[in-house]
Amino acid sequence: MTEYEVACLGKAAFPSRRTARRRARQIRGEGGPDMRAYRCWYCDRIHIGHRAGHATYLRTGPHGPIHLQEYAQ
């Protein structure tokens, strides 16, 4: 899997930072994780992602993502 695929593939691209921030607030309001809007280095579009320290999983692992609860054990 390339860096581009990890960074962009499957993520929603928003037309503006304002729209992305609105969606991030909506996710938080529905009980979801704390998200932030950012401009992607690969596609130069706006995505949303977890704020630092609020990720629900780590991207590393030979069998896919490792959930933080599993990693702590």
Image (cartoon, rainbow, N blue to C red):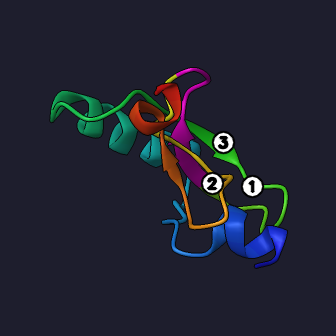
What's the mark number on residue 46?
2
Image-quadrant location for residue 52: top right
The residue carrying mark 3 is: 38
Sequence-wise, which precedes: disc 2 or disc 3? 3
* Residue sitting farthest toward the front: 73
- Label 2 neighbour load within 10 Å: few <14, some 14-19, many 20+: many
Depth order, front residue of 10/68: 68
Amino acid type at image mark 3? Tyr
Residue 11: horizontal and vertical position, in percent? 52, 66
Q: Find the distance from the CA under tag 1 to the CA under tag 2.
A: 6 Å
Residue 32: horizontal and vertical position, in percent? 26, 35
What residue range appears in magenta? 47-53
Q: Is residue 48 on the magenta stretch?
A: yes
SS at circle 3: strand
Name the residue: 49% across, 25% down: 72
- Label 1 neighbour load within 10 Å: few <14, some 14-19, many 20+: some
The answer to whether marks 1 and 2 mark residues whose Cβ atoms lie closer than 8 Å is yes
Does 26 appear above or below 61?
above
Residue 53: horizontal and vertical position, in percent? 57, 20
Depth order, front residue of 21/35: 35
Name the residue: 54% across, 61% down: 15
Image-quadrant location for residue 31: top left
The residue carrying mark 1 is: 40
SS at circle 1: loop
Residue 43: horizontal and vertical position, in percent? 77, 69
